[in-house]
Image: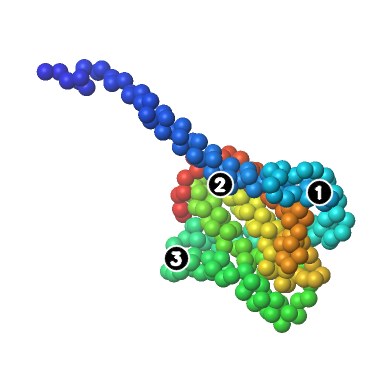
């Protein structure tokens, strides 16, 4: 007796049932609702609060502000140190990102390409800066830096941020170095390529997404960090989070805080969108072949 499988007949795939389709639509609605609550609503509220007219305000039971104006933006820009804080933050964060990447690369290379005794413990030790609270690290660094005779606020915060954000760069670059294919390295060397040519041909295609991701993530972490920038840098070196937290402290001014928060968040959102596109463009054919 010939079975259906032996006769070569194919079984048509089952169509999704109406109940499964309804369940998928329901789950999608729930997901979009969560996204709206956690992302769209807070961002929209920040935009509205930043445009509240100082003369009319925005009080219960008004669903929307009675009057909108850009006076809050002008007030924050002209009456605070926000212009200098923006310059300081966007001078500090790129420098921290580059220096952190340079410092993290050798360690990441060893973690990805070599096996040695105590490797797991060493990898765990690199995560210690993430465990210690930010203000504890800030107090420690302020004491250490001043005892070393380093009085440059910029250099002090730069050193502290590099130590604080090294775990991110090491983790990302470890994965990237692990994706470098050993057969490509061997082939380039067999063809007589120089070390620089080997790096460009074998390493760079796998490392480029990790390098850019590391730079962007460390940049965002540095520009949003408050504890070290406040304790080590105040009062001479002001950053955007320092201005923001001044409006969230004793003299709570929600509209002004909304202005500063948008100035801080919007560029970071754009960078994260760029990072997402970068990760999607990574070559999936790269496989982790260790040497």
Instruction: Name the residue carrying label 1.
Output: 56
Image position of 149 with respect to 219: above or below: below
Asked which secondary structure carries label 1, the reply is loop
- Foreground residue, 207 or 15? 15
Q: Which residue is mark 3?
A: 120
Q: Is residue 62 left or right of residue 69?
A: left
- Tag 2, which secondary structure? helix
Q: Nearer the viewer, mark 1 or mark 2?
A: 1
Nearer the observer, disc 3 or disc 2?
A: 3
Q: CA distance from mark 3 to mark 1?
A: 60 Å
Q: Residue furthest left?
A: 1
Residue 147 in which image quadrant: bottom right
Identify the residue at image location x=71%, y=62%. Answer: 248
Return the disc, 3 or 2, that comes first in the chain's sequence.
Answer: 3
Q: Quadrant of the N terminus?
A: top left
N-terminal of the pair, mark 3 or mark 1, is 1
Instruction: Check residue 206 in the rendering and tell me which mark sits there, or answer none.
Output: 2
Q: Residue at x 54, y 38 (%)?
A: 32
Instruction: Give coordinates of residue 194: x percent, y percent.
Output: 61, 50
- Label 2 crowding class (10 Å Cα cut-off): few <14, some 14-19, many 20+? many
Question: For residue 82, what is the image quadrant?
Answer: bottom right
Q: Is residue 204 something one can see in this rendering?
A: no
Q: Give the CA separation, mark 3 to mark 2.
A: 24 Å
Say if 178 sits above or below 237 in the image: above
Residue 291 at what x, y percent from top left? 46, 54
Label 3 packing within 10 angstroms: few (<14), some (14-19), many (20+): few
């Amino acid at each position: 007796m010939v079975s259906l499988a032996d006769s070569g007949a194919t079984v048509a795939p089952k169509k999704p049932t109406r109940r499964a389709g309804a369940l998928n639509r329901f789950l999608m609605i729930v997901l979009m609702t969560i996204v709206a609550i956690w992302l769209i609503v807070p961002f929209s509220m920040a935009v509205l609060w930043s445009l509240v007219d100082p003369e009319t305000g925005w009080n219960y039971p008004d669903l929307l502000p009675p009057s909108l104006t850009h006076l809050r933006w002008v007030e924050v820009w002209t009456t605070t140190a926000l212009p200098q804080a923006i310059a300081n933050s966007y001078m500090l964060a790129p420098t921290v990102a580059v220096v952190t990447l340079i410092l993290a690369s050798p360690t990441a290379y060893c973690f990805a390409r070599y096996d040695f005794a105590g490797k797991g413990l060493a990898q765990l030790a690199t995560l210690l800066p993430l465990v210690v609270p930010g203000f504890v690290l800030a107090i420690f660094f302020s004491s250490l830096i001043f005892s070393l005779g380093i009085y440059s606020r910029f250099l002090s915060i730069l050193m502290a941020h590099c130590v604080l954000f090294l775990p991110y760069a090491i983790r990302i670059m470890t994965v990237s170095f692990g994706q470098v294919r050993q057969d490509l390295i061997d082939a380039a060397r067999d063809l007589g390529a120089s070390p620089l040519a080997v790096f460009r041909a074998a390493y760079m295609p796998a490392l480029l997404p990790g390098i850019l991701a590391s730079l962007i993530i460390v940049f965002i972490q540095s520009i949003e960090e408050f504890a070290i920038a406040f304790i080590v840098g105040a009062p001479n070196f002001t950053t955007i989070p320092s201005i923001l937290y001044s409006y969230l402290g004793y003299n709570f001014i929600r509209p002004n805080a909304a202005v500063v928060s948008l100035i801080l968040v919007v560029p970071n959102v754009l960078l994260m969108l760029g990072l997402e596109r970068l990760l999607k463009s990574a070559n999936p054919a790269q496989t982790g072949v260790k040497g």
